[in-house]
Amino acid sequence: MEENGRTARKRAQILEAARPVFLRNGYVGASMDEVAALASVSKQTVYKHFTDKEQLFTSIIMDTTAQVEGLTKMITATLDDDGDLAEDLRALARGFLGAIMEPELLRLRRLVMAEAERFPDLGRTWYEQGFERSLKTLTTAFGRLAERGVLRLDDPELAAEHFVGLLLWIPVNKAMFRGGNDLYAEADLDRLAEAAARAFLRAYASPDTA
Amino acid sequence: MEENGRTARKRAQILEAARPVFLRNGYVGASMDEVAALASVSKQTVYKHFTDKEQLFTSIIMDTTAQVEGLTKMITATLDDDGDLAEDLRALARGFLGAIMEPELLRLRRLVMAEAERFPDLGRTWYEQGFERSLKTLTTAFGRLAERGVLRLDDPELAAEHFVGLLLWIPVNKAMFRGGNDLYAEADLDRLAEAAARAFLRAYASPDTA
DNA sequence: TGTCAGTACTGTACCGTCTAGTTCCCCCAG
DNA sequence: CTGGGGGAACTAGACGGTACAGTACTGACA
């Protein structure tokens, strides 16, 4: 799967250099000259690999959309065993939070949202491949827990939506509006994850396990 | 309070015309020429009222930050009477949702987030004046409900955060990534509000009122 | 011989300034 | 109450300077 021809190498080199440029300045603010310079590549080479600025941009985003894989695996891994439900949920919440609060990912989020109107396909793909996909995994996991009787819920999808809402709304918004990196220490994330997991359990745990 | 001199009129005229230009193209993409043209005003006049592009931009954002007033009033109005708690919460959720899903406000959100790195003050102000302020109002309202014994919570602020998280995470994200306007019908918003209010009650209502 | 770095070039867009002529508003004389 | 100056505010458009997307050309190098 790892292409290592000269062309593929150059292509990766350009992509890697282009990402920070677009992340820093947005689509309009990103300069192809800067991309070429940062990639130590001539502009001609950039245009050999990507037909134009737009195609380079969408390539950057689509590339990182694939990384959701890890998140879905983490979900099933954490909830599949028969351990303590409360503890599992807390761990799951903590994993989710840590993943989504990654500074690079947050910047990408901002970028995609900013350009969602200009590039509708991009926004839709990001939402479906990243957002909905992890939500769907969570939904099936919760569904299994309901069948085992440890969760009490009519609608697993709604429960999954509520779980991530409890967990993510506050920290993600804070991060989106206050650009900084040092918003939350590890301990803060622990606390947020624990609070969300406990509230979720109160709302959705079966009475006998609460 | 309503200034109607020529100066104030022109200023408002420019602001009104500039808003869609910035909303559509972002800060870098917005053209001062287009602003002037859309406002039916000469460029000279634009620069008489606003020292430069940056100041015009921040004026647009700050102007709309003031509109949170309405939201806080709605919160206290809905939760202050002694009506049915479940019904009040549902109504509050519905009001919140309707307000935040206003297309114009969503576009502003996107814009502020996109430029939060370039204009840190703007992001911070938006967050504090809009986000935190309404959250604080909700916190005190929940605190009163806890004192009356209808809610059971150690931390009113956490409860407020969870309330909005349950309610807003899904629809707001959907709207941010899928630019469209017709994402949700009124009935969908009703359903979302009801579901959030019920989950919140299960997590935070006193046992005797549940 | 073909690929790439380096760079010059073309065409366009835009910010902010400037000039010159025009319109509107307010105040006060009659 | 009225009507007409005075001066600020405004229009229209050109302009300098800069930046950038995308193309074209040259020379090196493998």
Image (spheres, coloured by chain):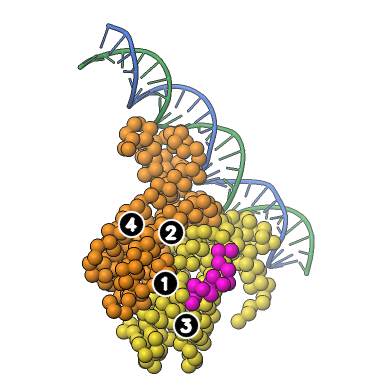
Chain colours: A yellow, B orange, C blue, D green
- Across and down, in percent, residue A94 comes to 52, 77
Q: Nearer the viewer, mark 4 or mark 1?
A: 1
Magenta span dominant secondary structure: helix
- Mark 1 to mark 3 CA distance (whole Å): 21 Å
Label 2: which secondary element: helix
* Callout 4: SS: helix
Q: Give the chain letter at badge 1.
A: B
Label annotation for residue B154: 1
Confirm or deny contact between disc 4 and disc 2 (CB under 8 A): no
Kindly identify the amino acid type of the residue bearing the numbered disc 4: Leu
The residue positioned 39% from the left and 93% from the top of the image is A148
Q: Residues within 10 Å of mark 2 (few under 14, many from 20)?
A: some
Mark 2: which amino acid? Glu
Q: Secondary structure at mark 3?
A: helix
Mark toward the viewer: 1 or 3: 1
Instruction: Magenta stretch: give its range.
Output: A182-194
Residue A136 shows up from this direction: no
Q: Position of residue A191 (x, y in %)?
A: 51, 73
The alpha-carbon separation of the residues under discs 1 and 2 comes to 20 Å
* Residue B132, label in figure: 2
Residue A167, by quadrant, is bottom left
- Which of A39/C29 is in front? C29
Q: Which residue is mark 3?
A: A89
Q: Are marks 4 and 1 in contact (CB under 8 Å)?
A: no
